[in-house]
Amino acid sequence: MKLPSKLIKKIYQYLLDNYPKCKQLPAKKNIKTIEDIFRLKLSHLKIGTSYGYFDRRLCEPKQYKKPSGKNYFRISSFDISQNKKQLKEVIERLYKVRDNYKTIYFDIEDNGGGDMIPSNIILYCLGGGIQSWMKDCKTLDKDNNHRCVWKNEWNPWTPWIKKENTSVYDQFLQLQLSIPDYDKYKTKYNGNIVVYSNHNTTSTSWYFVTYLAYSFSSTIKRYKTNNMKIGKVSGKLKIKGCTDTQSGDGNPVSKKFGTLLVKVPTQETCSRSVLTKDLLRYWH
């Protein structure tokens, strides 16, 4: 992708104005091409449509025969405000039947994300509590109106404990869950997990699949094709289809430069449970 140098400078200045860790970015004189911007280690940055090429053969929709029992969980969105009824039913049913089945199915095709809280509660239930890979979240957020930066830190895995999770507790209450004991399961689910996904599985749904891979995949084969990072799971986790990546986070601000739409994050994730090497990785 070749762009005029003046346009590159304008895009980079927009990035410097809005990104929380702008002081850690290279000097403007060192940014000469759009590839220089893409190589920056930002939490999130999107320019136009997805950059690069992914082997669409991994993403072609297939007619999978899906089950219909109580061990099949359709999640069309993780957005609490838009999909509270379904999320509430899924989480409550999972807590009731988790160990009654040898296989649990999650259908997240065309799930573009939403809130992390429902996803994290499901992962906590499947994991039988806190797993070694589950870390606290730390972010830097930038207020574009007042141009100030502040740090947030919280435990995202037990949102029902108010004193540990003041930033997400109120959001957790919106689910109105009826679960007597969130620590009902003391050990990790011992069965198989099947996930139905496609190229519209992104954002929170991508994190959901990534964390399932950390918990239930016996090995993860990581490789590149056409400069796109791919992850292939095995063992107790099977993915029918593929995912997109974790686009959509970082509370981005958007601006058009001619026909080019640039989304710059106003949030920098300092600490998360995702391994750095798995950022922007497609799962299948």
Image (cartoon, rainbow, N blue to C red):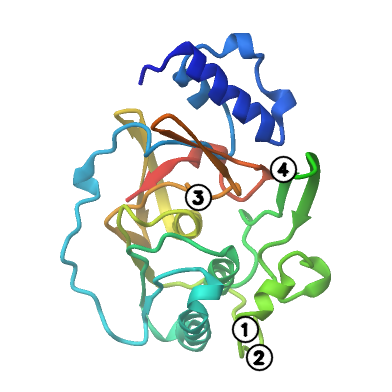
Residue nearer the viewer, 114 or 185: 114
| Residue located 68% across and 80% down the image | 173
Q: Residues within 10 Å of mark 3 (few under 14, many from 20)?
A: some
| Residue 97 placement (x, y as % from top left) | 46, 87
Mark closer to the chain start, 4 or 3: 4
Q: Mark 4: which amino acid?
A: Asn
Mark closer to the chain start, 2 or 4: 4
- Measure how far apart labels 2 and 3 are at the Cα level: 34 Å
| Residue 79 placement (x, y as % from top left) | 52, 69
Kindly give the residue lying farthest to the left in the view shown. Answer: 63
Q: Residues within 10 Å of mark 1 (few under 14, many from 20)?
A: few
Q: Are marks 2 and 1 in contact (CB under 8 Å)?
A: yes
Q: Secondary structure at mark 2?
A: loop
Residue for badge 1: 184
Residue nearer the viewer, 212 or 19: 19
For residue 123, above or below residue 3:
below
Q: Mark 1: which amino acid?
A: Lys
Q: Mark 3: which amino acid?
A: Gly
| Residue 272 placement (x, y as % from top left) | 64, 48
Residue for badge 2: 180
Mark closer to the chain start, 1 or 4: 4
Residue for badge 3: 248
| Residue 210 placement (x, y as % from top left) | 47, 53
Residue for badge 4: 144
Q: Mark 2: which amino acid?
A: Pro
